[in-house]
Image (cartoon, rainbow, N blue to C red):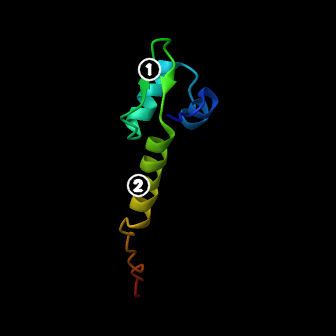
Amino acid sequence: MLTLTPDQIEEITGYRQPAAQLAALHRRGYWRAYRDRLGRVVLERAHYDAVAAGAAAAEQHAPQPRLRPPKLRTA
């Protein structure tokens, strides 16, 4: 099982504390992240890649806002 390194997890989450890292990962959809017996956060690389790919695909297919032209005042 390939996992992300502690430095990679810190870079992704922006946190050094394992509890904060885990909470940030769960908020972002990485539900399979967990803490091992030593208290370190474990995230499988395959799960990270799958969630990241799904997020990128969702952003590409998100509806774009339609802007209306401004109404000009007439005198």
Answer left or right for 8 relative to 38: right
In the image, residue 68 sits, relative to residue 26, either above or below, namely below
Task: From the image, tell me which residue sits under label 1.
Answer: 35
Q: Residues within 10 Å of mark 1 (few under 14, many from 20)?
A: some
Q: How far from the left and from the top, in percent, is residue 70?
A: 42, 78
Q: Position of residue 46 (x, y in %)?
A: 47, 44
Residue 27: image tag: none
* x 35%, y 68%: residue: 63
User: Residue 6 at x, y = what percent?
Assistant: 60, 27
Q: Residue at x 44, y 34 (%)?
A: 25
Which is nearer the eye, 45 or 52? 45
The answer to which image quadrant residue 68 occupies is bottom left
As helix, strand or loop, the secondary structure at mark 1 comes to: strand
Q: Which residue is mark 2?
A: 54
Height in image: 11 above or below 72? above
Horizontally, residue 31 falls left or right of residue 13, namely left
Residue 51 or 68: which is nearer the viewer?
51
Tell me whether circle 1 and circle 2 mark residues in contact (CB < 8 Å): no
- Where residue 33 appears, as percent x and y from the top left, is 42, 30
| Count of numbered marks | 2
Farthest top residue in view: 38
Which residue is at a point 42% across and 53% down the rendered structure image? 55
Rounded to the nearest angstrom, the CA distance separating label 1 from label 2 is: 24 Å
Which badge, 1 or 2, is on the more N-terminal residue? Answer: 1
Q: Amino acid at mark 1?
A: Arg
What kind of element bears circle 2?
helix
Q: Quadrant of residue 23?
A: top left
The amino acid sitting under disc 2 is Gly
Query: Looking at the image, which residue sits at the far front?
Result: 1
* Position of residue 29 in the picture relative to residue 13 (left or right): left
Taking the spot 38% from the left edge, 41% from the top edge, the residue there is: 29
